[in-house]
Amino acid sequence: MKKILLASLLCSFCMCLSAQCVKPAPLTTQQTQALVGTWKLQYTYNDKQYDTEIKIRTVKNNEVVCEITDPPITGKETAGEYFFCPSGEFHLKKYVGDIAYVFQGVPENGYIKGTLSVYDKNNKRSRGGDFLMSRVN
């Protein structure tokens, strides 16, 4: 019985470690100020290299708006989410119909380096590639 309980606890612990970030509270003023501006974006998607630009700004009530010149998934955007998870990793997630893509990485010294992921209509994740954002202004 003790072995079964120990195995269950170990399994639960491992599942928590591999879980994705849980979306926390809205961005703080300090986090928003660190993101607002124009960023050069280089990313790989489907083995192709893209060089483009991201503009992050705020509108009413300090709401963050993000415009990507050449996104990995094209079409009419239906929603967007921008947040930091407790580990300090920034998530920039955009929805295009039933599909979503997310750039997630840790900001450091005017750069954000991380991974691009794409989620299909069944929320199945596929790794799109790596990215590097560098602040222009």
Image (tube, rainbow, N blue to C red):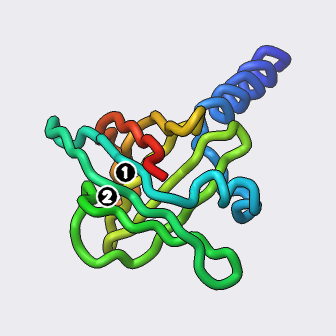
Disc 2: which residue: 120
At which x and y percent is residue 96?
32, 70
Residue 72 in the image: above or below residue 104? below
**Mark 1, other Cα within 10 Å: few <14 / some 14–19 / many ≥20:** few
Q: Amino acid at mark 2?
A: Asp
Residue that numbered label 1 is attached to: 124
In the foreground, 127 or 75? 75
Q: Residue furthest front?
A: 137
Q: Residue at x 57, y 60 (%)?
A: 36
Q: Point out residue 5 in the picture as x, y percentages from the top left corner.
A: 80, 24
Q: Quadrant of the N terminus?
A: top right
Q: Determine the residue positioned at 85% across, 17% down.
A: 2
Marks 1 & 2, CB-CB < 8 Å contact: yes
For badge 1, the amino acid type reads: Lys
On screen, residue 31 above or below 79: above
How far across and how far down the image is residue 125, in percent?
A: 37, 47
- Side of 134 relative to 34 (left or right): left
From the viewer's perspective, is residue 33 above or below residue 90? below
| Dot 2: element | loop
Name the residue at 61% across, 41% down.
89
- Decide if residue 93 is on the left or right side of residue 32: left
